[in-house]
Image: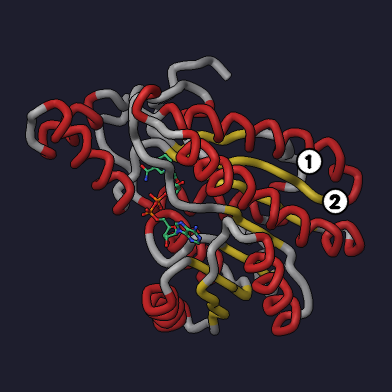
Amino acid sequence: MDLGLKGRVAIVAAASKGLGRAVAEELAREGAEIAICARTPADTEKTAKAIEASTGRAVLWQAIDVTRAEDVQAFVAAVEKQFGRVDICVTNAGGPPSKKFLEISIEEWRAAVDLNLMSAVFFARVVLPGMQQRKWGRLITITSMSVKQPVDGLILSNSVRAAITGLARTLANEFGADGITVNNVAPGYTLTDRLEELATKRAADAGVSREKIFEQMSASVPARRIGRPEEFAAAVAFLASERAGYLNGTTIAVDGGWVRSLL
Ligand code: NAD
């Protein structure tokens, strides 16, 4: 299937590793112009070079903090300067800490809102006007399976990602007539540093090995295994594509069937 991504300009946020990196690599392989950002300059540059080497496409990179509106604005301006526009914007950030409700400080709640909600708001504010003018755009947010079925021990993620889901659904309504689609992709257990961290924490809390935790995670998934970042990236590439023009305002779980709901 030709996804029609050749020559499209795509931003992938928080993409020095994990799911963001896999998405950037997949879109580059499909022929899109890519710009990535993440916090650490050395890691972000290394990833940009690796994607260039594996796909043969030049990758623009910048080290920014997605919780800072001015950083996001400057990054998007740099992408527009280099490529002329932004067609596809995949918002992403790290995950909030795994803690029990009474252990979480007010500052940690605010930080989670900044990290997982406001970062998406900042990107949407600066990329949507241009997409609206050109009558074509794809805004895709990386959320979590926790939006469909809350995950024990992840109250910050369970709460804040529900807010992004409301944001995306409302943007889909507001910008649908402009040829823009807004969708969320909700990863299930996928092998990245984030999952390794969660497994280490769960193992310490339960007094069992990390291997045991990974076994339990796998057993909870109908597919009986942990997902691979490139499996997640394939769904994002489809949503970003020309072919997905009538897919709007929805959340697609890429979770091996972990969420047990009907819809
Ligand atoms: P990861 O920790 O492997 O990678 C996170 C990336 O975000 C890194 O590139 C990091 O540099 C960047 N980042 C973090 N904070 C940033 C900031 N303030 N500004 C700029 N860049 C920042 O995580 P991942 O597994 O790739 O997950 C991506 C998102 O998906 C996270 O929000 C995570 O909670 C969520 N998620 C992951 C899984 C999973 O199993 N991997 C499951 C559900 C949800």
Q: Amino acid at mark 1?
A: Leu
On the rendered image, what quadrant is the N terminus found in? bottom right
For the residues labelled 1 and 2, the Cα–Cα distance comes to 12 Å
Seen in the picture, residue 238 relative to 170 is either above or below; the reply is below
Q: Position of residue 19 (x, y in %)?
A: 43, 54
> Relative to the observer, which residue lies in front, 237 or 104?
104
Seen in the picture, residue 192 relative to 65 is either above or below; the reply is above
Q: Residue at x 74, y 76 (%)?
A: 80
On the rendered image, what quadrant is the C terminus found in? top right
Q: Residue at x 46, y 67 (%)?
A: 39
Verify CB contact (< 8 Å) between mark 1 and mark 2.
no
Q: Position of residue 57 (x, y in %)?
A: 53, 82
Q: Quadrant of residue 247?
A: top right
> Relative to the observer, which residue lies in front, 12 or 119?
119
Seen in the picture, residue 116 relative to 72 is either above or below; the reply is above
Q: Earlier in the sequence, mark 1 or mark 2?
A: 1
Q: Amino acid at mark 2?
A: Gly
Q: Position of residue 236 (x, y in %)?
A: 56, 51
User: Which residue in the protein does label 2 denote?
Assistant: 179
Label 1 packing within 10 angstroms: few (<14), some (14-19), many (20+): many
User: Which residue in the protein does label 1 denote?
Assistant: 171
Q: Residue at x 31, y 52 (%)?
A: 192
Q: Quadrant of residue 227?
A: top left
Q: Position of residue 60 (x, y in %)?
A: 57, 80
Q: Is residue 184 left or right of residue 199?
A: right
Mark 1 or 2: the one toward you: 1
